[in-house]
Image (cartoon, helix red, strand yellow):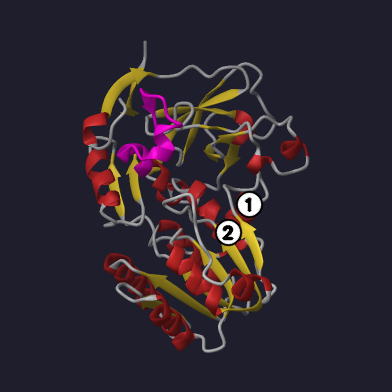
Amino acid sequence: MKTMKAVFKTGSGGGKAFTELREAPVPEPRAGEALVKVAATSICGTDRHIYNWDPSMAKAVRPPRIYGHEFCGHIAALGPGAETASLSEGDYVSAEMHVVCGACYQCRTGRGHICANTVILGIHDDGCFAEYVRVPVSNLIRLDASLPPAIGSFLDALGNAVHTCQPVQIAGMDVLVLGYGPIGAMCAALADYLGARTVVITEISPKGIAMAEQWIRAKGIGHRVKAVDVSGKGFEEQVEAVRAVCPEGVDTVLEISGAETAINVAARTIKRGGEFALLGIPGRDALTFHDYAHDIIFKGVSLHAIIGRRMYGTWYPMLSYLQGGLDVGHIPNAVYPGLDRFIEGMERFNAHDALKVVFTLE
């Protein structure tokens, strides 16, 4: 039996004691599936929640489980009935790792990304922190050979950022990005690429501010992109910090942080008729708007809740942006050969020392 290296969540607990690199059988592609040899895979915030065994993932993951859901690679084999005119063995691909039913009301009305029957590979079934991964062939996306694997490894996450930008106006707008973690960094890059007049990034982490400022300097865009350190600042001070950059307020908010204070700062500083794209997940169930009537209703603000990627109305624009010059080369700032140092990479991600931790396998 052919085996492979794979990273397993081994039991119900947090930290390195419950994650292990093991030998496992290479899976056989089933009907309608493809086996993909992984070229590169990256850590997502969800993987961190699995590693730490946070409550949201403790309810969803049943160990032992190979986790990971961001990757690119090459088709190694096709299962029965998986032959297509558009894909063949050897093709360079990534994949949508949300496997939807295709039969529910949401799926049949073009909204499969909110299918209630979604199975997420790397959470509910085995994922891609491995040398091989098994994926429905219908979920595969062909990639251009010019796309570096380090970038191809996190298209799932970049798709979340693109989806966050899709329902709102960016070009010519004053855009506020709440948080400069991996998705916040991608949203800031997208807002710049899509022609925002001003981009304001708020962040409480000194590491996040330092990485944002490094990107701004490297791009030479400090005249219209500002990183605002709001650590230790109260609500009114944060509002003033945003208004110091955009005195009339902001048109569009890209909310990545899930932080109640940040969300209320955005609600207070957003202009009348502004748009709010909400991707961040709060750390607790309840979240309070300080002045819901004044800041949301009476301003006529539009709220857009974002989950996953539209299938596949997010993937194709994202690939077009990359081919058209969207630069996210600064995002994968910790790259490891192979999976042997997975724990080290995860600990760096946990400590916010890297925006994206990537493992290259080819």
Measured as percent of width and height from the top left, residue 240 is found at: 43, 85
- Secondary structure found at label 2: helix
Residue drawn at point x = 73 percent, y = 32 percent? 104
Q: On the image, numbered disc 2 is attached to which residue?
A: 164
Q: Quadrant of the N terminus?
A: top left
Question: Mark 1 or mark 2, which has the lower sequence index?
Answer: 2
Circle 2: residue type: Thr
The correct choice, above or below, for 348 with respect to 101 in the image is below
Disc 1, disc 2: CB below 8 Å?
no
Residue drawn at point x = 38 percent, y = 28 percent? 66
Of 247 and 98, the residue lying toward us: 247
Left or right for 59, reference 338: right
- Secondary structure found at label 1: loop
Decide: few, some or many residues near mark 1? Use Cα within 10 Å; few <14, some 14-19, many ≥20: some
Residue 31 visible in this rendered orientation of the protein: yes
Q: Quadrant of the C terminus?
A: top left
Measured as percent of width and height from the top left, residue 22 is found at: 28, 23
The correct choice, above or below, for 194 with respect to 321 in the image is below
> In the rendered structure, does residue 57 fall within the stretch colored magenta?
yes
* Magenta segment: 48-68
Decide: few, some or many residues near mark 2? Use Cα within 10 Å; few <14, some 14-19, many ≥20: many
Measured as percent of width and height from the top left, residue 244 is found at: 44, 88
Circle 1: residue type: Thr
Q: CA distance from mark 1 to mark 2?
A: 10 Å
Q: On the image, numbered disc 1 is attached to which residue?
A: 314
Q: Quadrant of residue 49?
A: top left
